[in-house]
Amino acid sequence: MKSKQILERHMTKCQLFQPPATEIYRSHHTIEGKEEQLSIFEVDGLISKIYCQNLCLLTKLFLDHKTLYYDIEPFMFYVLTKNDDKGCHIIGYFSKEKHCIQKYNVSCIMVLPVYQKYGYGRFLIEFSYLLSKREELAGTPEKPLSDLGRLSYESYWKYKVLEFINEHKDDKVTVENISKSTGMNFVDIATTLQKNDLLKYREDKNGNAKYEIVMNDKLWQSLKRPKIIVNEDALRWTPLVLSLQLNNESMDTEDDLNNELIDEQMKEIEMKSGPVNNSVNDQVLKKKKKRKWRNKTGFDDRKQRKRKTPLTNGSNGNKSIANNSNLNSSEDNTNSPDRKAMAEDDDQTEDESTEEEFRNETDTSIDRNGDFKSSQES
């Protein structure tokens, strides 16, 4: 806003006091000795396009590498707000692709500079991994990371891995167990273990090499505890996409149903029109020939016959007929082979038509007493 008056006028007219989306998280947290109510809204980029575009343009003011502004339809935005009597005030957000093959749980994350260094960034990272656990997937942020993003993620990974090892000292700790409890990717877990010297190499009795995950107490005590902890019970959310196993099973069942429907349709077609060639499934029914519409005399009106002799331009009809007869006689006298062949074909067709009509008329004859007799017997 350019001035305070414009802001006050906008506040009197605007009736939007929260993001245009569904609230999936609400809980009370103590921040710097004060109790605050935090909420997270799930905004669909396909439904609220203008809001998401403005959110991306706002992020561009603080992130130079931000390139996505307008193609926001395939993304979901999770907006963190602080609630009071006046409404829900935006603290930050992170975006996530709806259907991602690489299993990225964060595409872009941003916290406004006013609310930085209060633990909201780690809160959003932990919330993104909570969604990955609900989806039963191992999530990871989109690569490459920025400098600030790398520092925040490495500190979060180190804390979560050491927390899990400290809680399971007596049990056997594996990378799979850490991934199931935290929702982290195997590669991210392996890199944190190698950087912090939490892997110990040893050999068996048979000489086989093995790596063991070891706890470092000094490193665990030196870590800072998170200022804000996510309350998992306060989340009201169901995943859009289930695990890959469920997807594969659903695809198999859909394929089986489609095959059964195709078989039933093929059987119905065979009952109506006879057996169908299995090699050609697409061409089931042949095109029917066009029916020739004939009048009672058997003459096809649609078919245009060519005249053997062209008409001459004359005022009197008798003169034109005479001229046509003269032309016919002159053309017949010519010895061209094409004219002779055409004349012979016409004579043959006329003879065949007369023979068929004679056979049809003399096939049967009715006696006076009502008995049918063939023409030969009569």
Image (tube, rainbow, N blue to C red):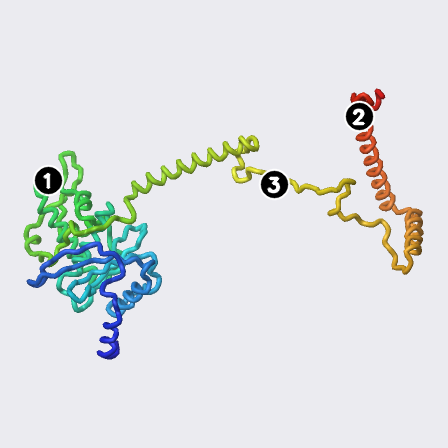
| Percent coordinates x, y for residue 114 in the rendering | 17, 69
Residue 19: image quadrant is: bottom left
Q: Which residue is tagged 1?
A: 171
In the rendered structure, are the residues bearing label 2 and label 3 in contact, judged by CB atoms less than 8 Å apart?
no
Pick the quarter of the image with the N terminus: bottom left
Image side of residue 57 versus residue 127, left or right: right
Q: Secondary structure at mark 2?
A: strand
Mark whose residue sits in front, 2 or 3: 2
Q: Any mark on residue 54, and which?
A: none
Q: Which residue is tagged 3?
A: 287
Image side of residue 364 versus residue 54, left or right: right
Q: Any mark on residue 364, and which?
A: 2
Q: Identity of the amino acid at label 3?
A: Lys
Residue 157 visible in this rendered orientation of the protein? yes
Residue 23: image quadrant is: bottom left
Residue 147 visible in this rendered orientation of the protein? no
